[in-house]
Amino acid sequence: MNGTRFLIAKLVGLTCAMFAFGFLLVPIYEVFCDITGLGGRTSNEAAEAVIAPDTSRSVRVEFVASVGANGPWEFRPAVASMTVHPGQMYTTTYWAENQQDRDVIGHAVPSVAPGTAARYFNKTECFCFTEQRFGPNEGRDMPVIFIIDPDLPAHVETVTLSYTFFDRAELAAAN
């Protein structure tokens, strides 16, 4: 009987450990991606703007916008692309419009491609840092101020900044 209790205790412990591992896997992965830039994730904190520009080099930055499933938005970048010098600060905007007759809270999730460039793409100001509250049928330009770090590998000539804009209620339902 003592061996049976020991086996049951081991199985219960293993089950608890597997549950804990599954529960913690997503937060651990998110922290790992934030630190390494894996998966094109950018930081959700403002970067310092004290980098000397490298005017001898140009990088093409492309801007992409998408809306989460069933999102009540019109969402688009102000420009499709721009050519920038690493180390120099640039500003662009994205337009978002609530297309419903009720208040909506939006949240933008950024991504950078190629994924290896994410750690070199620094935002000093971004609408993605906070939730965006929109009144019924309200629309507005939302700024992004960014700097590409001069340490961006030389073989990377094009960087794509992509945002997916979600209705906050949709995000809450998905989690």
Image: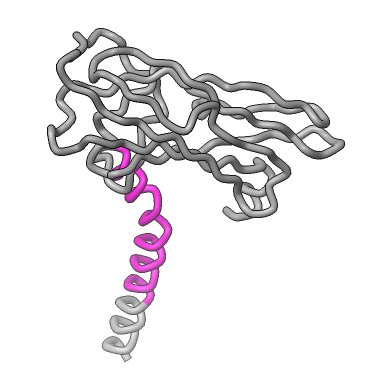
Relative horizontal placement of residue 141, taking residue 8 as reference (left or right):
right
Quarter of the image with the N terminus in it: bottom left
Relative horizontal placement of residue 159, taking residue 167 as reference (left or right):
left
Taking 63 as reference, is 46 above or below it? above
The outermost residue toward the bottom is 1
- Residue 115 in the magenta stretch? The answer is no
Q: Is residue 125 something one can see in this rendering? A: no
The structure residue drawn at horizontal position 48% and vertical position 20%, both measured from the top left corner, is 92
The structure residue drawn at horizontal position 18% and vertical position 29%, both measured from the top left corner, is 152
Q: What residue span does the magenta drawing correspond to? A: 12-34
Q: Nearer the viewer, residue 119 or 141?
A: 141
Taking 132 as reference, is 170 above or below it? below
> Residue 26: x, y in percent?
40, 53
**Tally of marks:** 0
Q: What coloring was used for the rendering?
A: one colour
- Residue 20 in the magenta stretch? The answer is yes
> Residue 8: x, y in percent?
36, 82
Picture quadrant of residue 99: top right
Prevalent SS, magenta region: helix
Q: Nearer the viewer, residue 133 or 99?
A: 99
Relative horizontal placement of residue 141, taking residue 158 as reference (left or right):
right
> Residue 63: x, y in percent?
44, 34
The structure residue drawn at horizontal position 43% and vertical position 17%, both measured from the top left corner, is 145
Taking 155 as reference, is 130 above or below it? above
> Residue 31: x, y in percent?
32, 42
Picture quadrant of residue 53: top left
Q: Is residue 131 something one can see in this rendering? A: yes
